[in-house]
Amino acid sequence: MRLVNRLPAPGWARVLALLPFVAVLVLYLIASAMRLADNPADKLLPSFATIGDAIVRMAFTVDIRTGTIPLWSDTIASLGRLFAGLGIATLIGAVLGIAIGVLPYLRALLGQFVAVVSMVPPLAILPILFITMGLGEASKIALIAIGIAPLLIRDIALRVTDMPPQQFVKAQTLGASSWTLVLRVVLPQILPRLIDSVRLQIGPAWLFLISAEAIASESGLGYRIFLVRRYLAMDVILPYVAWITLLAFVMEIALVALQRRAFPWFAAARTAQ
């Protein structure tokens, strides 16, 4: 049997999925032990015991100066900014993407403009946002929205234009207006695809957020990472990076669950492919 036709059993699939994570942990343990053997004060690859002490200090100990637990206060601050930016970008992406995909005049007017805007590196305009909007929450949220929205608009517009034209013809033959066509034909098919688009933008959204927090912020996960880097506190940085990764993964899982629950027909069609 050809390799392309050989499928792993469910149990083996889970084992194979875990292997890369186990390999990374083993390699880290070996590299950390080697460095600490040469220099017990080495900070680059701290031992798991040192990382555990840092986790207890950051996640379960109240900071005397602020009266808060650092990890959780940073998480709340970052997630608030992230959800606000992603929410604004998703709304803009859905509305403009569908409008550009459905309306030829609007596509002619904004199609190329959005394509050009989507090529602008969002981090390059971060200083402009800080100058015009200040160093508060608005500029950080705006960076996420500006960085994500153009890509969502283009993706949704392309997905709308890829829909079979026969659907539009049949709907109009049955007397559907442009508004009815959007609500009854386009929107039900685009919403599950919009969730896919948002899933693909979770990573970039975190990148924009951490960049903004690192430059100008007094709270947040990115702020904390860049605050402790001056002390080479890898025992704090590594858990924070792992925590950010876990949060992003949970967001991914939540969106997949939402898609399956709200649009079971879409998940069934994807599984059947």
Image (spheres, grey):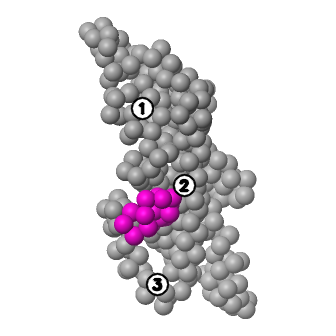
Residue under label 2: 81
Q: Residue at x 41, y 16 (%)?
A: 47
Q: Which residues are magenta?
A: 130-146
Measured along the vertical axis of the image, is residue 41 above or below residue 83? above
Cα separation, mark 2 vs mark 3, equals 31 Å
Cα separation, mark 1 vs mark 2, equals 20 Å
Say what secondary structure mark 3 lies in: helix
Viewer can see residue 252: no
Measured along the vertical axis of the image, is residue 79 above or below residue 26? below
Q: Residue at x 70, y 59 (%)?
A: 263
Q: Earlier in the sequence, mark 1 or mark 2?
A: 2
Image side of residue 119 versus residue 242, left or right: left
Give the residue type that dot 1 points to: Ile
The circle on residue 107 is 3
Give the residue type that dot 3 points to: Arg
Cα separation, mark 3 vs mark 1, equals 45 Å
Residue under label 1: 237
Query: Hey, which residue is sitting farthest left in the picture?
Result: 38
Say what secondary structure mark 2 lies in: helix
Within 10 Å of disc 1 (Cα), the crowding (few <14, some 14-19, many 20+) is many
Measured along the vertical axis of the image, is residue 192 above or below residue 251? below
